[in-house]
Amino acid sequence: MFNRPRLAVRKLACATGAMAIVALLGPAAAQAAKLTLGNGDQVSGEILDLKDQTLRLKSPLFGEVKIPWSQVAELRSDEGVRIRLADGTELQGQLVLQPDGKVVVAQGAAPARDLERADVALLNPPVADNATKYSGHATLGGTFNRGNSRDDALNLDAELVARAPTNRYTLNAESHEAKSTGVTTTSNRLLSGQYDRFLTPKDYLFVNAKAQTDKQADLTLRSTLGAGYGRQFFETDVKKLSAEAGLSYVNENYDLAANKSFPALSLGLNYEQKFFDNRLVLFNKTDVSVSLSNTQDTLLKNKFGFRVPIANGLNLSTQLNISYDHSPPLGVKKTDTNVVVGVGYAF
C-alpha cells in the first residue's frame, strides 16, 4: 500500500495517537501483533505474512499495511504465527524481535528458540500441499467399414501422471491397429514410463524406459533406457512446458534385419496449453534420439494435436503422429504418419 518508506512512516505515526482506540476494540485487538518502528512509532494488527523483506500487517485502523522489514525495530507477534527460517526449518508460536536484533520464538510447552534476525526468512508462508495429484487422458478412435470394402482401424492413446511436490510419475501407452480386407496394414504399440525427481520447483532429474513394436517396420522390439536433466518452464492449469536432455541406451530387435544397439543423446519437449477459457487444448510432444556412435541412427517421434472439451471431462481429439527412423531396415520407409480422430476423456 505504501510504496515509499517515508510515506509509510508518516501514516503509521498516526497509530501512536490511536493506541488507546485500538485497546478498546476488544479481545481480538489485545491478541494482535505489536511492533515498533525505528523512529519509535508503534502499530498493532494481524500479521498477514513476511516475504521479500516486506511485512504485511492488517491494522484495525488502516487496513492492510506494508512495512519494510528493515524498519521494524521491535515486534511481538500473536501465538499462532508460522515462521520459516533461512535453512528451511518451520516453527509455530509467538515471535519476539528485540531491539538488539535477537529473536525468541516461544512454542508453548516446547523449549523457546533463540535466533538472530537474519534467521527469519518468512512469516506465515503458503501452506505446502504435499498431496499427490493425478491427471491424465485417454483417446479412442477407429473405423469399421463393411460392404464393398472391409476395413478396421483402432487407435488408443493414453497417459497417466501422478504429481507430488518433489516427485512425478508418468505412464504412456499407444496402440495403432488396422486391417484392410483381412490383411494387417498397421500394427504398432508403445509403452513408456518415466520418473522425475525435482531438485527445485523447475529443475529435475529423470529416468525412463520405453518399449516399442512395429510389425510393418520389421521391428520386433525397440527398448530404451535413459536418464538425464529436465527443466519445467511452466506448470499451471493453463500451460505446461518442459524440455529434457540426457543419455540413453537403445536396443533394436528385428524380425528379418540385423539387430543393433547403441548409446544415444536423447532430447525431449512436452507442451500443453489451454486457450479460449479452456475451450481448446493444444499439445505437442517430441522425442529425439541420436546415436553417439553413428549419427545415421537417428530416431524422432512427434505427437501434435488438439482437444475440444465437450462436458464432464469428455472431449473430441485430433492428433498427428509422426515417427521417423533415419536408418530403417531395407524396404522400410523412413517416415510413418498417422492421423487419429477420436473421443477422449481427460481429468
Image (cartoon, rainbow, N blue to C red):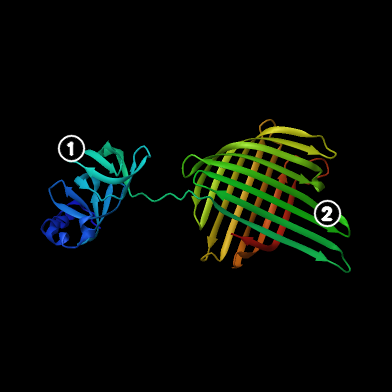
Please state which of residues 290 and 196 is positioned toward the viewer in this rendering.
196
Mark drawn on residue 185? 2
For the residue labelled by badge 2, is the local secondary structure a helix, a strand or a loop?
strand
Label 2 Cα neighbours within 10 Å, binned few <14 / some 14-19 / many ≥20: some
Residue type indicated by callout 2:
Thr
Q: Quadrant of the N terminus?
A: bottom left
- The crowding category of the residue bearing disc 1, from other C-alpha atoms within 10 Å (few below 14, some 14 to 19, many at least 20), is few
Q: Residue at x 60, y 36 (%)?
A: 227
Left or right of 303: which side holds 115?
A: left
Occupied quadrant, residue 144: bottom right
Displayed quadrant of residue 155: bottom right
Residue at x 18%, y 37% (from the top left corner)? 100
Residue at point 12% right, 55% down? 16
Q: Which residue is mark 1?
A: 100
Q: Position of residue 249 (x, y in %)?
A: 68, 34
Toward which corner of the image does residue 291 lie, by quadrant?
top right
At 36% from the left and 49% from the top, the residue drawn is 125
- In this rendering, the answer to whether 147 lies above or below 86 is below
Q: Which one is in front, 46 or 136?
A: 46
Q: Is residue 97 left or right of residue 14?
A: right
CA–CA distance in space, label 2 to label 1: 81 Å
Pointer 2 or 1: first along the chain: 1
Q: Position of residue 116 (x, y in %)?
A: 26, 36
Residue 332 percent coordinates (x, y): 81, 45
Q: Nearer the viewer, mark 2 or mark 1?
A: 1
Residue lying at the far left of the rendered structure: 17
Q: Secondary structure at mark 1?
A: loop
- What amino acid is labelled 1 in the image? Asp
Q: Locate residue 46, reporting x and y percent.
A: 26, 55
